[in-house]
Amino acid sequence: CSKERPQWQCRKKASVSFGMPRTSSSISEGRFPIWLVFLPFALVGIVNVARAPSHAPVVSRRQLALQRSRQKPPDSGWAAVETSRSSAALSSEEATRIALEKGSQRVRAAAAAVSSPVRGVVTAEALDAVLPKGAVVWLTFSNAAYLHFAQNFYLSCAAVGRAHQLAIAALDPPSLSSWAGLGVPVLNFSVFGDASDFRGIGADQARFRRMGAMKVAAFLSLLRRGRPVLCSDVDTVWLADPEPFLRSRAAAADIAVTSDCLSREADANKRGDSRRFDPKGVWFCGH
């Protein structure tokens, strides 16, 4: 301090200083060093830094919870689900085998619940004899390659209450034996003898026409007895009973058909004139 700066100004400045006091008599003189207030916090920080390893990663609460959930015992349900998800995907053959096994169980149970005097291999005459007059015969075709599809089709018919009217036309011996063993009425057209998946059959016109002839023969065996026939391929399912709709329009047509195409515009675009559709693919819609 000097004459230009009175002593009280010097003491006021020293009392708010954050630096180390020059003498040990600061506290006794009423000049409390404020840096002492922060000393405990600094010491705690130093201790924490010293305890933590220098390479410790920063882990969020979400990451920590995920790590703990993965440490559950292997016999828990969670671990079983994770194990099944991480396992290799099923091959097509294995998936088909499982579908056939479970499908056979369900079809056998559904067939047992149907009140029908005919089961197994039947003829058109026998089927016509047991069905009420005017009842529609629901018909589809099955071979070994698409047996699991046919099982699914049967279950959809059972779900809408029409399994007692359904007959399966077997196109090969394996499917004939399978349907007979399940207790489902099956027409024997196994002379066709093709158990393949029909891929590439379009290039084999003779084989394709032979399959079509077998289907027409199945229709005629029932139509000649005055039976109306409702036929669907096995790669479809019935979500509701279509008979009320079809009967309401029975007077308008002798034969009603549907297209594989779900778009009227695409179905009409046989020549590929519409710019909306790929000209290379229009012929696939509705065949």
Image (cartoon, rainbow, N blue to C red):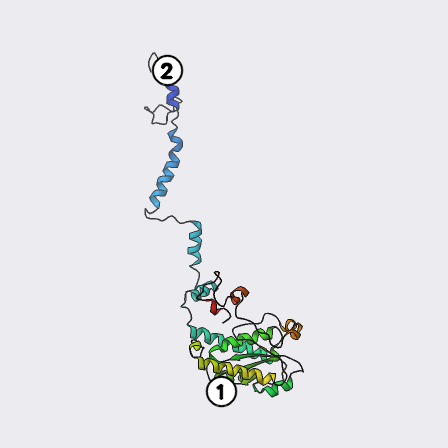
Q: Could you tell me residue 132's position as x and y percent?
A: 67, 82
Pointer 1 local density, CA inside 10 Å: few below 14, some 14–19, many at least 20: few
Q: Distance between the residues labelled 1 and 2?
A: 124 Å
User: For residue 254, which quarter of the picture?
Assistant: bottom right
Quarter of the figure that contains the N terminus: top left
Is residue 60 placed above or below 162 in the rendered structure? above
Q: Is residue 98 left or right of residue 131?
A: left
Q: Residue at x 42, y 49 (%)?
A: 60
- Sequence-earlier tag: 1 or 2: 2
Task: Please give the count of numbered marks on the rendered protein.
Answer: 2
Judge by depth and name the residue closer to the eye, 253 or 66: 253
Extreme top residue here?
A: 3
Label 1 secondary element: helix
Q: In this view, does 11 lie to the left or right of 256?
A: left
Is residue 279 placed above or below 9 in the rendered structure? below
Q: Which numbered tag is attached to residue 191? A: 1
Amino acid carrying label 1: it is Val
Q: Circle 2 is placed at which residue position?
A: 7
Judge by depth and name the residue closer to the eye, 200 or 184: 200
User: For residue 205, which quarter of the picture?
Assistant: bottom left
Q: Is residue 226 left or right of residue 57?
A: right
